[in-house]
Amino acid sequence: MAEDKVDAREGTWRQLIPWTELFRGFQVALDLNKLLLAAAGILVMAVGWWVLAKVFATGEDKIPPDWPGRYSASSKEDWSQFRKERRHWNLMNEAVGLAADPPVTRK
């Protein structure tokens, strides 16, 4: 029995303190190939959103509807139609940026 060799168990920090495995994420994140792939993905997404914005803004007016403009100021139906068109224009302007300068709102 004295001749049996007993190996000392090798201990690492990962075995002693297992939560240090979380710090390996930094090592993986600093890989140049992954960083280039992420940058390419960001660029492709930006170009894709720009193309979609241009496609969906094709038939929209650049000038917002104005009251009373082409509407009758005494008609409730014209007022509701104006509100509907203005809300649509505001949504498209916020999403796509129809107007170069945002319209001035009066209070």
Image: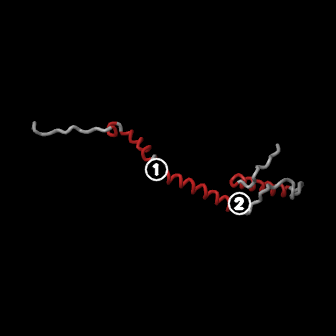
Residue drawn at point x = 31 percent, y = 38 percent: 12
Give the mark, 2 or 1, whose residue is nearer the N terminus: 1
Q: Quadrant of the N terminus?
A: top left
Q: Is residue 72 left or right of residue 62?
A: right
What residue does disc 2 label? 57
Residue 80 in the image: x percent, y percent? Answer: 81, 55
Tell me the residue at 64%/60% (across/down): 51
User: What residue lies at 77% left-to-right and 57% top-to-bottom?
Assistant: 62
> In x, y percent, where is residue 74?
90, 54
x, y percentage for residue 106? 82, 45
The CA span between labels 2 and 1 is 38 Å
Quadrant of residue 92 within the rendered picture: bottom right
Amino acid of disc 2: Ala
Q: Is residue 96 left or right of residue 48?
A: right
CB-based contact (under 8 Å), mark 2 and mark 1: no
* Residue 1 or residue 27, whichever sits in front: 27
In the picture, which quadrant includes the C terminus?
top right
Q: Amino acid at mark 1?
A: Leu
Mark 1 secondary-structure assignment: helix
Q: Which mark is residue 32?
A: 1
Task: Locate residue 49: give its quadrant.
Answer: bottom right
Q: Residues within 10 Å of mark 1 (few under 14, many from 20)?
A: few
Front in this rendered view, residue 32 or 104 = 32
Residue at disc 2, secondary structure: loop
